[in-house]
Amino acid sequence: MNTFPIHIMQRKPMRPLHNLSDYVVEELPSDLELMRSGTAGQYRDLVQKAENLAQDKGDVIAVSRGGQILQLLDCTILESAIRTHGGVPGPLLSDLTNRCAALGKSIPTLTYEGLVAINPLATDPRTFCTGEIGTAELFFYQSHANIEYILARCVQEMREILANVYGEPARDIDLSITTRIRGNLIPMVQTINRMMKQLFSKLPKYAFDAVRPYFDVNSIRGFHGPSGKFSAGVFAVDALLYGDHPDMNLFLQKKMAELAYFPGTTASGDCFSGQDDMRSSFTLAQKKETLFSMQNKVESVELYDVMRTLFREMHMFRSQHFAIAQRFIPDALMQGAGTGGETDLQRYLKHARDVYERAMNAQDRKILDACLFSPLC
Ligand code: HEM
């Protein structure tokens, strides 16, 4: 039985695939623990069990996209568990996975959307591990979900600011832009940074080591694994903030080429950004309607100043993220591959950080120019 009700006062079961979902939630984590410890259990038993559970599932009927992706999550957790322990998912499970994916218009593999956005973390969570490690795993997903929630609010705030400046008919450009960046946006990014800090200090490395293999590349179906790389919230914030800068634009273009890995939009509503947010924010970046470029229209030293703080906080986010990767996956960072498919992790993560370093420098130049050449100072 599942042994970590620690964070869940009362489970409210959400089991769209009935006995298959029941098994994934209640028994699989303990079975996997036995397999990891070599005490008992064989992947062959798991393959057979999964085939039995996948039988008679003609009624893949969830109507909401959230329900459809939850069905897919249950199937792909099983597939990943089998693969990670050396097996190959059988035809019934594979077929069920394909049908759930088609219904939810998703790729047929374990996704960031499934694990973090759709997984009912507060009421009926899915995890690969049980006990203390399972609790840490849940904390890992919850940290991601909380960060995504704040990112979605940042995106909303940025959109409103940009609409104020570039909207038709043009509205008065007023002081409130500076106030909103200082009073709303910066504190939100600071909260995200505090959460990253917590993740760094509270997530035990041994727990992360136990879970990470389940996120590996899906070598059987040929897909990347789930990764924060597929956060549409981070993408949209980058695009709306600085997406017209050539380095950032190229970085975003590469992510756009992997759009299918990012969350769909309608499954989890406003509290989680998705592919539509990526498309619309990328379009604004292409039109050079970003917070960075907005400053040319709203010449104000006060605005330049708060924008520098905002860039500094985003730089901090990337620096902390790089430090997290160094702590949790030092070997992979030197020579391995990321679950999201990157092969030169050092370079990739440093690049994401350095783009913001350049943003801070560009911002400094703006402040300097304003002070040297304009009567604003
Ligand atoms: C234990 C914690 C974490 C580790 C070890 C980790 C590791 C990694 C690695 C190795 C990559 C490279 C891409 C790939 O997977 O191939 C990556 C990318 C990325 N991760 Fe994380 N990550 C962690 C937590 C987070 C969190 C909480 C977020 C917040 C949403 C996040 C957001 C990102 C983003 C946006 C990228 C793409 C690169 C970028 O835009 O900066 N990660 N991560």
Image (cartoon, rainbow, N blue to C red):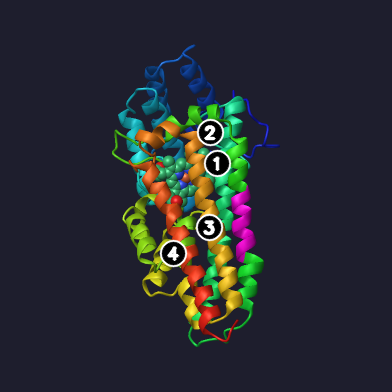
The image's mark for residue 239 is: 4
Distance between mark 4 and mark 2 Cα atoms: 32 Å
Check disc 2 and give the amino acid type: Thr
Q: Which residue is mark 3?
A: 314
Task: Give residue 376's quadrant in the image.
Answer: bottom right
The residue sitting at 64% across, 66% down in the picture is: 184
Check disc 4 and give the amino acid type: Ala
Label 3 beta carbon less than 8 Å to ligand 1:
no
Q: Is residue 3 left or right of residue 214?
A: right
Q: Is residue 221 left or right of residue 227?
A: left
Q: Earlier in the sequence, mark 1 or mark 4?
A: 1
Secondary structure under badge 4? helix
Q: Is residue 174 left or right of residue 9?
A: left
> Which residue is farthest top?
39
Q: Is residue 135 left or right of residue 337?
A: right
Q: Earlier in the sequence, mark 3 or mark 4?
A: 4
